[in-house]
Image: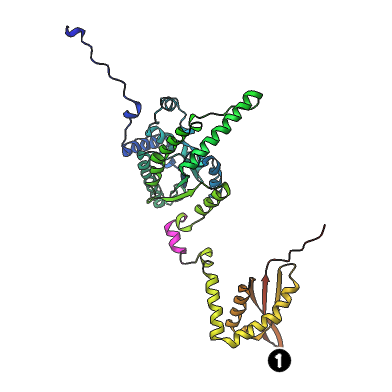
Amino acid sequence: MSDSNFMPPVRPPVPVADLEIKDAQLIFSSVWADLQERFGRDCLKFPREFIWLGGAPGAGKGTNTPFIAQARDITAPPIVISNLLDTPQAIAIKNAGQLVGDREVISLLLQELLDSKYHGGVIVDGFPRTKVQVEFLKLFYHAMLELHTECRGNGQARTHRKPMFRIALLFVTEEVSVQRQLSRGKAIREHNRQVRQSGVGELLEERPTDLDPELCRKRYKAFKEQNYEALQSLKKIFHFHYIDAGPELPEVQKNILHEFAYQSSLELSPEVFDLIQSIPVATQLGLHARQEMVTRIEQYEEENVELFRKVVKFIELKIIPIVKAHAMSGHAQINTEEDMLDDPLALRMVIDVLWERGFHVTVDIHRVEVPERIDPKTFEIFCKIKKVYRIEVRYPPSDIRRGH
């Protein structure tokens, strides 16, 4: 056979995903440079708070995302990565059964985040899912810190605020995930059957993975190997919220509220937090308040028994009768000039005893000038100070039941 007839072997085309650059630094540098060239560095204004949300299939991300947004006072709609990737190239890659390239995902995401509607905060659903995306998140955070530092130096820190990244994971077990996926598939199939039969309504997408138990398990396994591992790897770097999404919805939402409760140490700048952290947090004050109150009452009886007995007798004779008279309203105010209360310890005893019995008590000391004498030569009026203790007592009002 002559050389002119020689044909080299035909090689199969290289999958698109194999051609993708896997170096996170190269991808980020390229995308970041494009953004600066297109919009200008000063215009790279991103949200301050990011919630990077991941969840197992059937974890209820669609149901719980609005509740998370409400808990964090985020008004912008969530960015759902699967919905964001609707370019022809992305659709072609997905139709071929391959993952959309990290560079395209990152580029589209950053462009979307520049929209001013996300300025107050944003939830990003379905990111990160790969190791490259995880590394990108770190690079993106540090790039935002650089912008913030630059603006602090020229007095424009508000235009590029210090970013706060939260990683949130809605987690359910494989058993719960499979059960919910199949239940969803069954509900969608029944909905579509009724639409076809009546001609009313719109058909919903029937996912094969919602109809086959084995495919449901594979989807859950893919989540554990990609999204779950990606988010877990950021646990030591950013604020991480693990939310058990297995129970009924009210319990899940209770878990969400607990996880996203306001924490000044996370949300204030270090400079501001250092200034105010010596002031106690109200919720922390109440943690051991009752235990400390019980200890004090025991000490009253051991160390100041006579005064303690007088205080108890005062409460029984002067306070409780008025409290009982106002039982229907649950609010009583007692004004007294009792000299014993001039002793701060006695006043503390009154408050502690009433609190121990379930009353909410506040005391206000009102000082009144009472004319005592007049200088006949100068007509100057001399007064003495009279103390009036206003003891306000609140408690659950009487539950009046009327017959029908």
Determine if residue 351 is in view: yes
Q: Is residue 315 magenta?
A: no
Quarter of the rendering containing residue 312 = bottom right
x and y, in percent, of residue 60 in the image: 52, 41
Within-10-Å neighbours for mark 1: few <14, some 14–19, many 20+: few
x and y, in percent, of residue 282 in the image: 53, 64
Q: Nearer the viewer, residue 60 or 276?
A: 60
Against 57, residue 324 (above or below) is below
Q: Quadrant of the N terminus?
A: top left
Q: Does residue 380 appear to the left or right of 265 in the view shown?
A: right
Against 268, residue 107 (above or below) is above
x and y, in percent, of residue 336 in the image: 69, 81
Q: Quadrant of the C terminus?
A: bottom right
x and y, in percent, of residue 162 in the image: 43, 50
For the record, the magenta segment spans 267-278
Instruction: Please report the residue visible at 52 percent of the width from the left and 66 percent of the height from the top.
Output: 287
Q: Does residue 250 appear to the left or right of 177 in the view shown?
A: right
Q: Does residue 204 appear to the left or right of 336 in the view shown?
A: left
Quarter of the rendering containing residue 28 = top left
In the rendered image, the residue lying farthest to the bottom is 377
Report which residue position mark 1 lands on: 375
Q: Amino acid at mark 1?
A: Asp
Instruction: Please report the residue visible at 49 percent of the width from the left and 49 percent of the height from the top.
Output: 244
